[in-house]
Image (cartoon, grey):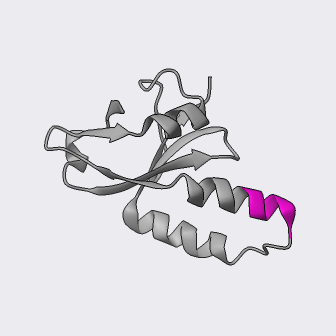
């Protein structure tokens, strides 16, 4: 497990970490926003190979994170390895999610 700091303001929040196959990295979403994205993704055509691969990677690696009172969370090793993230400090805070680029 890799410990990351997502901020004390997120203590107690439900977060979802997953592989971001488009931006090539690791993305962390708040639970409600992830559900919105998931609803759009499952409506994609599974006949299309690119849609099918994206859905398999994005939803297949989705993992619930527990945020401690100090604002820390633990990422599973297999997710960090699949996302090819080497520096968990290299964070980009986007509108409703966090993103770490691949190495």
| 48 shown above or below 78 | below
Q: Quadrant of residue 60?
A: bottom right
The stretch drawn in magenta includes residue 54: no
Location of the C terminus by quadrant is top right
Q: Residue furthest bottom?
A: 43
Marks counted in the figure total 0
Q: Is residue 47 above or below residue 57?
A: below
* Residue at image point 33% right, 32% down: 4
Q: In terms of depth relative to the viewer, which is nearer, 77 or 39?
A: 77
Q: Quadrant of residue 5?
A: top left
Q: Position of residue 95 (x, y in %)?
A: 47, 51
* Residue at image point 66% right, 38% down: 24
> Vertical placement of 88 versus 21: above or below?
above
Residue 52 location, quadrant: bottom right
Where residue 70 sits: x, y (%)? Answer: 15, 37
In the image, residue 85 lies at what x, y percent?
54, 28
- Residue 62: x %, y % from top left: 50, 55
> Looking at the figure, which quarter contains the N terminus?
top left
- Given the current orientation, which residue lies at the most extreme left position? 69
Tell me which residue sits at (52%, 21%) in the image.
86
Position of residue 84 relative to residue 42, above or below, is above
The range drawn in magenta is 48-53
- Write the residue at 67% across / 62% down: 55
Q: Main secondary structure of the magenta part?
A: helix
């Amino acid at each position: 497990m890799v410990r990351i700091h997502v901020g004390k303001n997120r203590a107690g929040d439900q977060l979802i970490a997953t592989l971001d196959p488009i931006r090539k990295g690791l993305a962390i979403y708040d639970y409600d926003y992830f559900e919105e994205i998931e609803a759009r993704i499952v409506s994609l055509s599974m006949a299309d190979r690119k849609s099918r691969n994206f859905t398999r990677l994005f939803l297949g690696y989705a993992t619930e994170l527990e945020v401690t009172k100090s604002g820390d969370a633990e990422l599973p090793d297999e997710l960090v390895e699949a996302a090819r993230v080497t520096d968990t400090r290299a964070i980009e805070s986007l509108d409703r999610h966090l993103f770490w680029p691949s190495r």
